[in-house]
Image (cartoon, helix red, strand yellow):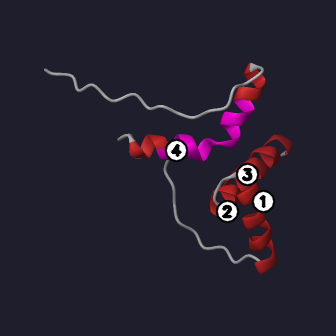
Amino acid sequence: MTSRKRKPVVLDTPQFRSEAEEAEWWDRHQELIADLLLKHGRRGAVPTRNVSVRLPVTDIERARRLAEKRGVGYQTLIKTLLHEALRKESKIA
């Protein structure tokens, strides 16, 4: 049996001042982890489903501006914000 060597994935992550700061960064960038898992052959590790949501145009425009400032896509920003809100609500409930 021959083992296939995978090329290591190199990430351009910022320098962190503490483990807490690093954990917070990774928590905010979970879509990056999911994308990397899918890209590198671990399909199904993070199941997703397409949904349609009608949003006010003003909210979409605001999301686009905020996403541009953060250097991410607006859909990624919306997914991240939704994930954070769901996690926060789960702690309350």
Cα distance, mark 1 to mark 2? 8 Å
Few, some or many residues within 10 Å of mark 2 (<14, 14–19, 20+): some
* Residue at 70% from the left image edge and 60% from the top image edge: 78
Few, some or many residues within 10 Å of mark 4 (<14, 14–19, 20+): some
Q: Nearer the viewer, mark 2 or mark 3?
A: 3
Q: Nearer the viewer, mark 4 or mark 2?
A: 2
Circle 3 SS class: helix
Please state which amino acid type lies under the numbered disc 2.
Tyr
Q: List the residue tagged with mark 3.
A: 70
Cα distance, mark 1 to mark 4? 22 Å
Residue contact at pointers 1 and 2, CB within 8 angstroms: yes
Q: List the residue tagged with mark 2.
A: 74
Cα distance, mark 2 to mark 3? 10 Å
Q: Which of the pair 89/38 is nearer the observer?
A: 38
Instruction: Report the disc number at residue 29.
Output: none
Apparent side of residue 77 relative to residue 66 in the rendered image (left or right): left
Query: Taking the image as drawn, is residue 45 in sight?
Result: no
| Span colored in magenta | 23-35
Residue contact at pointers 3 and 1, CB within 8 angstroms: yes
Q: List the residue tagged with mark 4.
A: 34
Circle 4 SS class: helix
Q: Which of the pair 61/23 is nearer the observer?
A: 61
Residue 62 locus on image (x, y percent)? 80, 68
